Amino acid sequence: MSEVTNIETSAKGPENITHIPKIAYPNIKSVVRLFFMYLVFLIIVIITAGIVFMNTPKEFPAVRSIFKVLTNAAPILMAIQYTLKRSEKQQGYPSTINYNKIEGWLIPVLIIAATAFSIILERISVLLPMPLKVREIFERVFTKDLFSFMSVVIIAPIVEEILCRGIILKGLLKNYAPNKAIIISAILFSVLHLNPWQAIPAFFGGLFLGWIYYKTQSVIPGMIFHAAINTTGFAFLFLGNSKQDLPDIFGKMYYPVLLVSALVFTVSCIFINKKVKVAVTNQPLTTNLQ
């Protein structure tokens, strides 16, 4: 790993400028450490929330929904706070999140691409099919209520994009070549789901989310795409117990729909790639990338 030199100037004047070798946060070791810290945060949140809601009557479904929102969002928020403190310690300044504005045309393109990609991801998930009993557990956990919708469609895309792209990928791009940085962030994104049946689709989704962040240097496009993906998945999840799989939903039209989805997603990527130039702020802090 090559070191990155940050120049810090004291208040006394330029004559007191010092060169302090720093490595941008995070590197691969930091990402691994973050994953284990996330597990610790998750355990803390589950135990704490379990104690708080232990004596709550089961006939109050809203309480169960609030519990789900807390257990989903709180560990990510704790991880964000952790990474900000670690980045300040390692770099000398905390990481900042890029909320750069995007052009209006990109929003519908991202939503269309996400809808098509959701159908593709469903096919990819066949590589590791979810057992029926596990699926039934998911159906019980993700109930049809406002809190579940907010957790999956609004809160998760925001906090996960801030962490995985806004902080982690932003730092990785300063230490590694873009392809390597995007792959590392996608791996982290997949394992943070702590669900082997979602890990493969999450990895491929993380690749696109990393690419769109690299192109725009903003978490906004990723949040939009991520929210659209989760909205589509949320809708498919509740189409009925007998028609949980897309082949059952579309019937004989499934493969034509899958083909059209692949074409739509490919064209969307080509269009975005031509219209959006790589942000200048993506320049690495080091010229000796790994």
Image: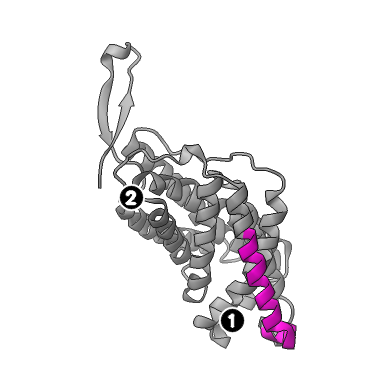
- Residue 155: x, y in percent? 62, 54
Q: Nearer the viewer, residue 219 or 148?
A: 219
Q: Nearer the viewer, mark 1 or mark 2?
A: 2
Magenta region, residue range: 247-268
Residue bearing mark 1: 135
Number of labelled discs? 2
Residue bearing mark 2: 27
The residue type indicated by label 2 comes to Asn
Specify the quadrant of the image occupied by residue 139: bottom right
Residue at 60 percent of width and 64 percent of height: 68
In the image, is residue 175 above or below residue 38?
above
Marker disc for residue 97: none
- Is residue 104 within the magenta segment? no
- Residue 64 visible in the shown view: no
Q: Nearer the viewer, residue 27 or 259?
A: 259
| Main SS category, magenta section | helix
Label 1 packing within 10 angstroms: few (<14), some (14-19), many (20+):
some
Specify the quadrant of the image occupied by residue 3: top left
Specify the quadrant of the image occupied by residue 144: bottom right
- Residue 22: x, y in percent? 28, 37
Label 2 packing within 10 angstroms: few (<14), some (14-19), many (20+):
many
- Is residue 264 within the magenta segment? yes
On the rendered structure, is 65 left or right of 50?
Answer: right
- Residue 158: x, y in percent? 59, 51
C-alpha separation, residue under disc 1 versus residue under disc 2: 36 Å
